[in-house]
Amino acid sequence: MNKRSQEFLSKLINAISPSGYEDEAARVWIDEARTFADDIRRDSHGNANAVINAGGSPRIMLSGHYDEIGFLISHISDEGYCWIQPIGGWDAQIPQGQHVVIRGRKGHVHGVIGKCPIHLLKNDAREKVTKLEEQWVDIGAKDRKAAEKVVAVGDPLVIDRGMHHLQGSLVAGRGFDNRAGAFAVLEAARILAKLKPQAEVHAVATVQEEIGLRGARTAAYGVDPHVGIAVDVTFATDYPSMGDATKKFGKVKVGKGVVITRGPNINPRLFDLMVETAQKKKIAHQICAESRPTGTDANAIQISRAGVATGLLSIPNRYMHTPCEVVSLDDLMATAELMAHTCARITTDTDFIPF
């Protein structure tokens, strides 16, 4: 991955944009898209759309959501502590003892999620997980009046973790679910701008996936694509404690390429085209099976309007929905390249009727 793309990815990961508050990530994504896209479109839901080869045919929608899990402030106590509600699916073990950053009225505000010291916990309490609704944020305010000068009820917050390089091509950070996908669809669009496809391609960064695939539903209705390819992260099964998961999800390894999904949520002819393209272009890839509608944008896109020929590409991710998700930069670029070269092969003569 080149330096410019790495800088774009880092800015995207560092944006504070939980579901419903995606504007920070949107600004980063749109600024990058403006450097090469034919047209940039936005809607009232918050989806951003970079168009390549406007006026071409057929219409293809590439989708990756740029919202993340997080919290919002639900109450500020007289003592100045901020009580919070989760946005998206949280493991209650994770937030306590973490640094957080809040998008306050006048800028970012730092705080911590408090925890009673282990010395003062009774034996039974040491073995229990504190419920999310019993966790609070301490911003250091002396009382409610002082806190309300910098934060307000409804302000969003996330765990304060940026992107860090590990060994080789691996990186760790918060929000790769699914800034990785939003990054990959725009990188695919960047490649397509040079490949000059016959199709009109809409690279769409969608909102509110973590609370019900909401942005993909409205974006797909607006774009009205003939073909859709969603990009999300998927569960890597290459680390300790994932034993039985391999039986369900297969052997999915970080650094071994993009994952191409097969199953009822996927158009079989589009699946075959993506696999054939990966083989032809020597793009590292893995195959997984999903027996039901996936919990991704592909689900919403497939059943939009009269139905869309839909595919799903996934980026292997360790430790999903934690502040230390791990992905491979090589896998991200493999995903972008496969999308781009697949789209470049689609013409008005490409038949996606499954039988």
Image (cartoon, rainbow, N blue to C red):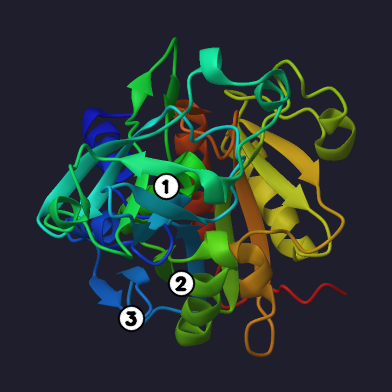
User: What residue sits 67% from the left and 27% below the top?
Assistant: 125
Q: Name which quarter of the figure residue 174 lies in.
A: top left
Residue that label 1 marks = 179
In the visual, does 204 lie left or right of 250? left
Q: Does label 2 or label 3 sit earlier along the sequence?
A: 3
Q: Which residue is mark 2?
A: 199
Determine whether 68 is above or below 352 in the image.
above
Image quarter for residue 35? Answer: bottom left
**Residue 151, position as x, y percentages in the image:** 21, 56
Element under disc 2: loop
Residue 226 position, x and y percent, is: 58, 79
Residue flagged by tag 3: what amino acid is it?
Asp
Q: Of label 2 and label 1, which has the lower sequence position?
A: 1
Which circle's residue, 3 or 1, is located before the other in the chain? 3
Along the viewing direction, whichever of 154 and 214 lies nearer the viewer: 154
- Marks 2 and 1 sit apart, C-alpha to C-alpha, by 25 Å
